[in-house]
Amino acid sequence: MGSGSSRAPNSPTPHPPSGPGAADGAAAAPGAAVATHCPYCALQCGTRLHPGAGPEEPLRVEPDAGFPVNRGGLCQKGWTAPAVLRAPDRLRTPLVRGRDGLLAPAGWDTALDAVAARLAEIRAAHGPDAVAVFGGGGLTNEKAYLLGKFARVALGTRMIDYNGRFCMSSAAAAGIAAFGLDRGLPFPVTDLGEADTVLLAGANPAETMPPLMRHLNKAGALVVVDPRRTATAERAALHLAPAPGTDLALALGLLHIAVTEGLVDEEYVRARTAGFDAAWRHAAGWWPERVELVTGVPADAQREAVRLLSGARRAYVLTGRGAEQHSKGTDTVAAFVNVALALGLPGRPGSGYGCLTGQGNGQGGREHGQKADQLPGYRHLTDPAARAHVAEVWGVAPESLPGPGLSAAELLDALGTAGGPRALLVFGSNPVVSAPDAARVQRRLAELDLLVVADFVPSETATMADVVLPVTQWAEEEGTLTNLEGRVLRRHRALSPPEGVRDDLAVLRELAVRLGEPPDRFPADPRRVFDELRRASRGGPADYSGISYARLDAGEALHWPCPEAPDGAAPHPGTPRLFLDRFAHEDGRARFQDVDHREPADARDDRFPLWATTGRQLQHYQSGAQTRRVPELVRAAPEATVELHPDTAARAGLAEGELARVRSARGAVLARVRLVATLRTDTVFLPFHFPGHGRANLLTGTALDPRSRMPEFKVSAVRVEPVEVLETAVPEPAVRSAAG
Ligand SMILES: Nc1nc2c(c(=O)[nH]1)N[C@H]1C(S)=C(S)[C@@H](COP(=O)(O)OP(=O)(O)OC[C@H]3O[C@@H](n4cnc5c(=O)[nH]c(N)nc54)[C@H](O)[C@@H]3O)O[C@H]1N2
Ligand SMILES: Nc1nc2c(c(=O)[nH]1)N[C@H]1C(S)=C(S)[C@@H](COP(=O)(O)OP(=O)(O)OC[C@H]3O[C@@H](n4cnc5c(=O)[nH]c(N)nc54)[C@H](O)[C@@H]3O)O[C@H]1N2
Ligand code: SF4
Ligand SMILES: [Mo]
């Protein structure tokens, strides 16, 4: 991997000097490199794509040395991303399920007419909420915005949510409660390199955001909180390995130590916060030895963590999915934020709290209205002023906008049930693999009258659909994404899409027009959609009104909020660092939150004596729909695995490389045993990137966080057992039959 080796020695080129023709949406001149960004995670590493002179020539991607987030680095997924553009099974024509139950190629008009007609029928028979929409945090800002508008205006449904609910929603809820605003990192990534101490709670960036490690390696001490000794933990000055689901107790304990050892920044707490006393009431009961009993983290290690943070001139507390994906994820993040507040970190230059947002547009995707309770600009759907503003931009009556609907897991679980949605449109997610209790989700999808999936590969969800719509990929389209530090970035078109493929914006427009919307209301040109998004976001918490394609193409680094400047005034420079003077609550103060520890939804017993936790490995991205189509990545990580301590494996009668069955109260997974001597003996780990019987989500449950509605991906009670080879030939779970 090119860790910096490909950095041009003395040419920090501005990013992005748009490729030829890029700005007007035409494909670049043959062979010319185009500046764009990696299609995968929220780091949004800057890249240059060399399209090659013809369709037979290899596509080559290289890191952009001038982009500060990755500075010439890329991970293995980024280097190999072009392979998905030419995946042999790439979708190139719409597919419609026929009377014989099989998906068959169809023309665009046939497919779109059929979808629109079925949607209209279902709506007429069962009301607008019978049609649901499921979006994704990988969609550009323009797509996420238009998808939300499509649901609220063209369909008139309350039922829209997206996979970000499964991602950073607990951190978002805790951040809004604490600071009055949710921007994953309220400071640029590069600030992290100046830190003396960084505490990472439940994040493994050495595998999930490798170029971020360049910044973290420059920092002083890393403190890693993870039940596993991950590649990130290997680089830490201190590794705390709590049992899965016990971070809340640990964070309460850290606050306890800060208070009892006199390390609280009292001046800061007095001047900039509220609610300390209520938070302390609970933390007072979490002395280090009690925390050790619950978490397994030695009392001395807890004290050392607090000393490393409080003794630092500049320090950060960061959370990842390991702390957040719990039925108490919001309270867990709140407890870590409480620690950061007690030590006076948030809103101080060179210090702070942040959440490492995950998906390519995980930040922008949560701001522009594909969320159940939200309107563009991170506005709230129940706020009358927000409804009036957005309705005016959309040219509809505020009363016509539906209210909030169900959250992602609840929405999926309602599909096809009495009174639940009868049709679902999926844009940018593969819930058959990635949703909790996946077998149940699969059964619900099979109950629908109509499932429509827009994708560029036949994902596990697409292969269940009645209609599949083939769409463009990153290198074939224009748009914007907002990375984990709230910086808005341009995606540039470098290639013409294959014939027969349309982009998501065009698909939404075509469907809206067929549902009777005026064509002007659903522009398909990304620049026009972005200009409308700017107006819709104006005055909201995530204000993009001062951002334009022209400013971004000129290489400006614009972090929201970036309001439009009054006539004649200099353009707003954007806001790389938030909260330096005040937090976003009306009184300017941050809030300590009053939280206490509680147990996970599952309990261990004789039948299920182990904790299973789930997450990621370096080579694969999410449900694997994309990376399982890259030969180099598949060779390195071909199949589902389960990490076990050698003693745990021995007790179960399993050895390295054997096939294990991991079973929870929901279902069972087949996975290859990997022995990991540094793992806790009460914990096993499965990546969730694999399909079929290898799906980690056959184990997970639908217990939800009461505030964020986040499922409990990170703790399930399981047992592990050997599998006789013959037994593995069980049939795959049911697929859909003919269209209804
Ligand atoms: N290679 C790769 N990179 C990715 C992605 C990918 O799929 N693959 N996806 C992107 C996305 S969308 C996201 S959200 C990010 C996620 O990035 P991360 O948050 O870094 O990823 P995870 O592996 O889900 O979880 C991080 C760690 O949490 C630990 N963990 C499990 N349970 C607990 C617990 O109870 N407490 C604590 N403290 N830790 C626990 C796991 O052992 C794991 O090492 O990655 C992004 N980058
Ligand atoms: N057990 C367990 N489950 C988890 C997690 C975990 O840690 N453990 N993590 C959760 C998290 S953090 C996340 S973010 C989710 C992610 O899980 P998913 O939502 O399934 O994410 P992806 O696999 O990225 O699926 C995106 C799909 O949309 C397609 N796609 C990509 N870009 C576009 C586009 O622009 N338009 C359209 N129409 N399609 C597109 C891709 O080809 C792919 O099929 O998984 C969650 N599930
Ligand atoms: S770290 Fe993320 S954005 Fe960067 S190359 Fe890897 S997957 Fe792409
Ligand atoms: Mo995510």
Image: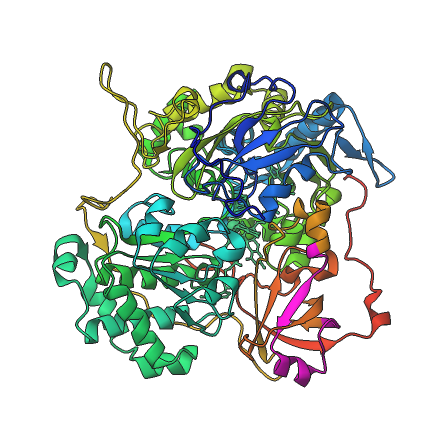
* Range shown magenta: 636-660
Is residue 732 or residue 501 the one in the foreground? 501
| 656 relative to 229 in the view: left or right | right
Whole-percent x, y for residue 102 in the image: 84, 40
Say if residue 227 shows up in the picture: yes
Whole-percent x, y for residue 595 in the image: 32, 66
Displayed quadrant of residue 721? bottom right
Whole-percent x, y for residue 477 in the image: 58, 26
- Verify whether residue 423 appears in magenta: no
| 630 relative to 76 in the view: left or right | right
| 154 relative to 56 in the view: left or right | left
Q: Residue furthest front?
A: 9
Seen in the picture, residue 466 relative to 200 is either above or below; the reply is above
| 423 relative to 737 in the view: left or right | left
Is residue 488 or residue 245 the one in the foreground? 488
Residue drawn at x 54%, y 56% is 207
Is residue 99 or residue 437 the one in the foreground? 437
Residue drawn at x 65%, y 57% is 438
Residue drawn at x 82%, y 67% is 728
Q: How is the image coloured?
A: rainbow
Seen in the picture, residue 295 relative to 617 is either above or below; the reply is below
Say if residue 420 shows up in the picture: no
Whole-percent x, y for residue 372 in the image: 47, 43
Work out which quarter of the rendered image holds the C terminus and state it: top right
